[in-house]
Image (cartoon, rainbow, N blue to C red):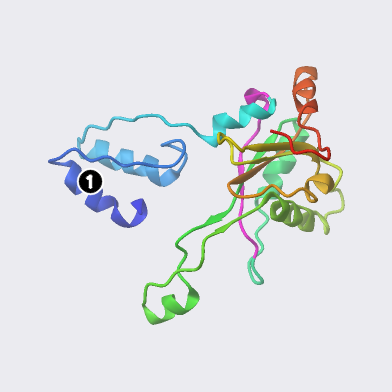
Amino acid sequence: MVEEKADEILSEADHAHVAFLVVGDPFGATTHTDLVVRAKKMAIEVKVVHNASVMNAIGVCGLQLYRYGETVSIPFFTETWRPDSFYEKIQRNLSMGLHTLCLLDIRVKEPTLESLCRGRKAYEPPRYMTINTAIEQLLEIVQAREEPAYTEDTECVGLARLGSEDQMIVAGTMKQLQMVDFGAPLHCLVITGQTHPVEEEMLYFYRCRTSIQH
């Protein structure tokens, strides 16, 4: 929305109060920062009301926030598009002993190929990447690597519906997490680096078992 209607938002804000509501942290997307920059250049006053975000809510799993490296986004693979640029970031984080937060793809209001060709507005059904799919793609990427940064035995933490009453947190290897049904979206995944004893104590409560961990 903001990409398509930024000019409209700014033109209205020139003479009226305009609110722009977003999911998560207001500055979690480059387009949101761009909107603020453009507003300030137009001498439009900007007030920010900070929001809850996965970037800080992730701390509930027990891994300390200052021990995270660069966050990565994992997109859905297609038959013709299988990007792996995030692999190097994960590799770099792990080489420094840092955890990696993986944000999983969300496909909402994506136009269908037919609608793009015909100039009509038609959208694909919403899709939300699961932890299982993310791990499948992560493991596919390392198959051709001589010295993979991670394997199916690498420790991870899977998190679903953070902040809700039915949030789910499970710690285990990639192989173990692939067998877990995390239920409804939204999902995210943490690939753990070197862990502190206090982190290990917290992760113990979420270790992959037969029962679901909350």
In-image side of 144 versus 38 (left or right)? right
Q: Position of residue 170 (x, y in %)?
A: 74, 37
**Total label count?**
1
Quarter-wise, where is residue 84 in the image?
Answer: bottom right
In-image side of 211 versus 48 (left or right)? right
Q: Which residue is mark 1?
A: 10
Q: Residue furthest left?
A: 15
Q: Which residues are magenta?
A: 64-77
Q: Position of residue 8 (x, y in %)?
A: 23, 52
Q: Position of residue 114 (x, y in %)?
A: 46, 79
Q: Position of residue 81 (x, y in %)?
A: 63, 66
Q: Secondary structure at mark 1?
A: helix
**Who's the residue at 79% across and 54% down the image?**
139
Q: Residue furthest bottom?
A: 118
Residue type for callout 1: Leu
User: Toward the viewer: 208 or 193?
Assistant: 208
In-image side of 110 versus 192 (left or right)? left
Does residue 136 sit above or below 28 in this rendering? below
Task: Locate the C terminus by quadrant.
Answer: top right
Residues packed near mark 1 inside 10 Å, few (<14), some (14 to 19) or many (20 plus) = some
Quarter-wise, where is residue 100 in the image?
Answer: top right
**Who's the residue at 56% across and 29% down the image?**
56
Task: Locate the N terminus by quadrant.
Answer: bottom left
- Do we see residue 77 in this rendering? yes
